[in-house]
Every structure is written in structure tokens, then in C-alpha cells.
């Protein structure tokens, strides 16, 4: 770090972490506020995040303040947020997101020391620009890199820190009773993703649900967010009564539902990281993303990952085939076998990842 920035860092009393989305990224950032508090216990640590994901930090013991910006905020709202940040007097701001909104808010924050990844939007407006690792680095470690760049000591083995909202836990307990469900006696299935290249086919989730109910006699519960209702309807039609569902579940209650389940099985997405943070047995189906970067950080889990040379890719669409064959290559028996391993050893050490037996050239038709 440039020696001129040492005095700015030394004098900082208020720090802001900007991490707008998404759920998984937010959960994987939970070690960062803790590291800041360990470095300087008197530091006021705030997190700026989009409202749907604020529950990740509202009960974090190292977070003094949670600020929210509306999801998909218009330019006027973003400028209003920037003005509020300037009034708040943050001396130290970390842009942990790298998108255009986070970059704009960082640049306009008025902080005397601004930190961003070198490839972030508007990074030129920051005094400290953090280069990416030359190696494949897990997201937890990547999000601690800006602190290390400033000379702040970070833990060798960071721990995720996710705390359940007591009010949400109470609401879920009531809903459990109303539905005749019991703590630790249901399986949460997560069949959705923001990317089609990371979403296992709905028909296979339906088949898996039937097999899980037959084998374990446990209810299969899907927790759907507001944008997932159409896909949920299709899944329920395929599942033939094997799946129970809750619609429009806010993140705080979703966390509480996962806290009280027996197992989580589903796509590489935010709920998988919630399960890992809470120490729940966790079966994760990978598609286009790099498991070395996005695997569950902790907790007992099994990975099912395809073996295609085009992985990882941008993920917004399949660039090699007419459909995402990577995630489609995972078979139902493989997932069932992974579930069986975790049911037999629910607190065992993290096992080695499972590779799909389908090996294919990315250029095959």
C-alpha cells in the first residue's frame, strides 16, 4: 500500500462495505466485518446491501449498521443514496461488488480512502485498487483480499458468520406446527438459480423428490422467492404431490427454514451457502461455475460437478451447445447417492467432490 494511505487508514473511525447482491456473495462476505472488528474493535462497521439480502447482516455481531438500497434502483435513487453516504461521514469504503452501482456509490461516497478491485467499474476513482489472485481463489478469500491489501490481518481459515433473526425463527416455528412438520425432519430442495446454466432440469428434481420421499419418509420442501413462482408451478406439476412449497419466502425466513431442516439439496446458489454457514448437510449440483471458487466453504457437503473443458464460463448462456449440457449431465442416481452418504454421516468431514462420469469435449455436437 502507498505510504500516503497509512495515515488515512490509521485515522478511520467509520468503515463501509458495499456488497449489493446476491445472497451467496453476501453470506461468503460475512468473515469480512469480523476481520475489521478484530483489527480495530472501536471501528464502526456498516454494510450497504440491496434490501432483499439485508437479513444476512442484520444480526451479525461485527456489523454496527445495515444500509439498504432498493434492488434495481434507478439513477435518481442511487444518487440519493450516494448523498446519504456522504452525510454519514465514512472515512473508509470498500467496494466489494464491482458492478456499476457499487462503483458509483463508492466514487461519490466522500470517503477519504476508497478501496476496490482493479477490474471494478469506476475503480479509477479509488486510491487502492486490488489485483485479483493469479490462482483460482475461493470467493471467501477473494473478499478478504482488499483488507489484506491494506495490511489488515485476515484469518488463515475464515469462518462464515450467519445469525438467524429470532423473529423469523419464531414465525417459522409457527408455520412448522401449522403444517405438521418437525424440526430436523424435512428436506429443503433448492431447484432454482439465476442462471439456466446452473439450474438442474425440473423433471429431475421432481423425480429426485419422489425417490427421497420413498426412501426417507421425509417431506420435501421448496422455498420459492417472488421471482420463482412460474418455475415453481411447473415443478409442482411434474412432482405429482411429492413436494410441498412455500411462496414468496423472504430471505430471513428462508435462513430460519434451512436452520431447522435435516438436509439441503439443490443447485449451486445462495441457499447452498446458507446451509454451509449453518452447518447443515448440503448436496450441491454444479453447472457452469467453478467449484473451486464457489463450493460451500464449510460444513458437511457433497459436490456433483460435470467434467467439461468449457467450465467455468460466463454462465449467462451456454456458448457450446444448444442447452447447458454441463448441468444436464448430472444424473438422478448420482444425487441420490450423494444424499445417502450425507444421511449416513451427517457430521462427517467434508468429502472429496464427485465428478460426473460423463466426459465430453466442449466441441462435440
Image (cartoon, rainbow, N blue to C red):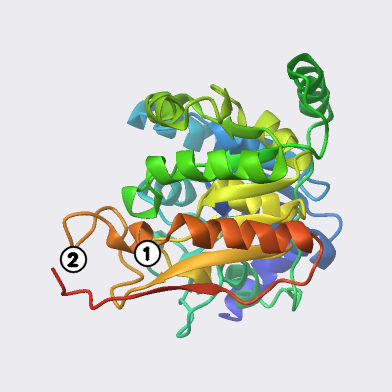
State the residue position of label 2.
320
User: Residue at (24%, 54%) from the top-left corner?
Assistant: 317
Left or right: 165, with 104 as reference point: right
The image position of residue 94, as x and y in percent, is 57, 57
**Which part of the image, by quadrant, shows the C terminus?**
bottom left
The image position of residue 213, as x and y in percent, is 63, 38
SS for callout 2: loop
The image position of residue 362, as x and y in percent, is 22, 74
- Label ID, residue 227: none
Label 1: how many Cα within 10 Å (few below 14, some 14–19, many 20+): some
**Which part of the image, by quadrant, shows the N terminus?**
bottom right
Q: Relative to 314, say whether 235 is above or below.
A: above
User: Residue at (83%, 34%) from the top-left corner?
Assistant: 183
Label 2: how many Cα within 10 Å (few below 14, some 14–19, many 20+): some
Asked which quadrant contains residue 261, the reply is top right
Q: Nearer the viewer, residue 129 or 175?
A: 175
Asked which quadrant contains residue 174, the reply is top right
- Residue 271 visible in rendering: yes
Q: Earlier in the sequence, mark 1 or mark 2?
A: 1
Q: Nearer the viewer, residue 223 or 201?
A: 201
Marks 1/2: CA–CA distance: 35 Å
Q: Nearer the viewer, residue 36 or 279?
A: 279
Q: Nearer the viewer, residue 134 or 206?
A: 206
The image position of residue 165, as x and y in percent, is 79, 32
Left or right: 146, with 346 as reference point: left
State the residue position of label 1.
124
Q: Residue furthest front?
A: 214
SS for callout 1: helix
- Residue 128 visible in rendering: no
Q: Residue furthest top?
A: 178
User: Residue at (74%, 52%) from the top-left corner?
Assistant: 280
Q: Relative to 141, say whether 214 is above or below.
A: above
Amino acid at each position: 500500500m502507498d505510504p500516503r494511505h497509512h495515515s488515512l487508514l490509521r485515522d478511520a473511525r467509520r468503515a463501509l462495505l458495499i456488497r449489493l447482491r446476491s445472497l451467496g456473495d453476501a453470506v461468503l462476505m460475512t468473515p469480512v466485518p469480523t476481520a475489521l472488528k478484530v483489527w480495530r474493535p472501536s471501528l464502526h462497521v456498516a454494510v450497504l446491501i440491496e434490501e432483499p439480502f439485508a437479513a444476512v447482516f442484520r444480526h451479525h455481531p461485527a456489523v454496527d449498521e445495515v444500509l439498504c438500497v432498493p434492488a434495481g434502483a434507478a439513477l435518481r435513487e442511487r444518487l440519493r443514496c450516494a448523498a446519504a453516504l456522504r452525510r454519514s461521514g465514512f472515512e473508509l469504503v470498500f467496494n466489494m461488488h464491482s458492478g456499476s452501482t457499487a462503483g458509483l456509490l463508492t466514487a461519490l461516497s466522500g470517503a477519504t480512502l476508497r478501496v476496490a478491485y482493479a477490474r471494478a467499474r469506476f475503480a479509477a476513482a479509488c486510491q487502492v485498487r486490488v489485483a485479483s489472485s493469479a490462482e483460482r481463489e475461493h470467493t471467501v478469500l477473494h473478499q478478504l483480499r482488499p483488507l489484506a491489501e491494506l495490511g489488515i490481518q485476515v484469518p488463515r481459515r475464515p469462518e462464515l458468520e450467519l445469525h438467524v433473526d429470532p423473529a423469523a425463527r419464531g414465525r417459522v416455528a409457527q408455520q412448522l406446527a401449522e403444517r405438521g412438520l418437525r424440526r430436523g425432519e424435512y428436506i429443503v430442495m433448492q431447484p432454482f438459480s439465476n442462471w439456466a446454466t446452473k439450474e438442474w432440469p425440473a423433471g429431475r428434481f421432481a423425480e429426485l423428490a419422489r425417490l427421497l420421499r420413498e426412501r426417507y419418509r421425509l417431506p420435501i420442501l421448496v422455498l420459492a422467492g417472488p421471482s420463482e413462482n412460474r418455475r415453481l408451478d411447473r415443478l409442482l406439476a411434474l412432482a405429482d404431490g411429492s413436494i410441498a412449497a412455500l411462496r414468496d419466502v423472504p430471505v430471513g425466513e428462508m435462513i430460519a427454514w434451512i436452520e431447522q431442516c435435516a438436509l439441503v439439496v439443490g443447485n449451486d446458489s445462495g441457499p447452498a451457502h446458507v446451509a454451509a454457514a449453518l452447518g447443515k448437510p448440503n448436496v450441491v449440483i454444479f453447472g457452469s461455475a467453478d467449484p473451486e471458487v464457489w463450493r460451500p466453504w464449510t460444513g458437511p457437503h457433497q459436490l456433483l460437478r460435470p467434467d467439461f473443458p468449457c467450465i467455468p464460463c460466463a454462465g449467462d448462456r451456454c456458448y457450446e451447445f444448444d442447452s447447458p449440457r454441463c448441468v444436464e449431465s448430472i444424473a438422478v442416481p448420482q444425487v441420490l447417492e450423494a444424499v445417502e452418504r450425507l444421511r449416513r454421516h451427517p457430521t462427517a468431514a467434508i468429502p472429496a467432490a464427485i465428478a460426473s462420469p460423463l466426459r465430453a469435449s466442449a466441441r462435440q455436437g
